[in-house]
Amino acid sequence: MNKLTYLVAATALIPMSLSHAAETATGTATVMVQNTFTFGQDSGIDFGTIRAQIGSADGTNVNVMTMTLPADGSNPTVAESVSGDSSRLSTLNIITPGTPGVFSVSGAAPNTALTITLPASPFTLNSSGGGAGPTFEGAITEAYITSGTFANQLYDGTTTFLTTDATGSATFRVGGTLSTDSTGNATNYQDVAYNGQYSITVAY
């Protein structure tokens, strides 16, 4: 056996060790929470132009007349909602039909169901001319969905919901009732606008 053979054999007996270079980096993670969204009125509910007269000056057995303005945009109707003395009959006649209120949502989660909470109590519409004359009682009674999965349906929160589109937007209309004063008044309705306010809540 020559010297070269010995050298190869000796090398084979030496354990081989491999050396690796390693580096560690720290990564970052970020998430932005946005539970809020934009919700507002595009146009207020307008009960139109009417003729209105109070049926009593002392609030005794006043006949209350009520206009119903549907949220789907169909024609409003008028009916006697509280019956009293026929000699104390209030008057409510439609001259120009009104329009539902319009509300919109933007900046919400896409393709997501939202709930609508309408006001639980009626609200008062007071004369913009001031004074102590009679008022009107308003109520928001229904919402009509105009976008999304349940478009062109009345909202009920059980089978029909307000749903956002791919951009997180949604729209709906509201309808309600307008009633003449049930307490009577010594003066009559004025030829001015009567205004009132109410609150609606939209939530996930």
Image: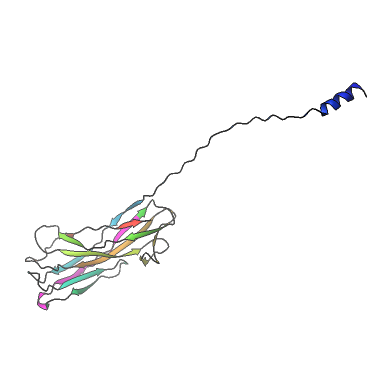
User: For residue 137, what is the image quadrant?
Assistant: bottom left
Of all residues, the one furthest to the top in this rendering is 3
Of all residues, the one furthest to the right in this rendering is 1
Magenta residues? 86-104
Residue 198's place in the image compared with 178, above or below, is: above
Q: Quadrant of the N terminus?
A: top right
- Count of numbered labels shown in the rendering: 0
Residue 50's place in the image compared with 30, above or below, is: below
Q: Left or right of 94: which side holds 200?
A: right
User: For residue 165, what is the image quadrant?
Assistant: bottom left
Frontmost residue, 158 versus 16: 16
Residue 9 visible in this rendered orientation of the protein: yes
Residue 193 visible in this rendered orientation of the protein: no
Does residue 129 show up magenta in the picture?
no
Name the residue located 37 percent from the left edge and 67 percent from the top edge: 153
Residue 17: image location, x then y, percent: 73, 29
Residue 96's place in the image compared with 18, above or below, is: below
Q: Left or right of 46: which side holds 35?
A: right
Name the residue located 14 percent from the left edge and 72 percent from the top edge: 91
Of all residues, the one furthest to the bottom in this rendering is 86
Frontmost residue, 36 versus 51: 36
The colour scheme used here is: rainbow
Residue 144: image location, x then y, percent: 34, 64
Does residue 101 show up magenta in the picture?
yes
User: For residue 102, what is the image quadrant?
Assistant: bottom left
Q: Quadrant of the C terminus?
A: bottom left
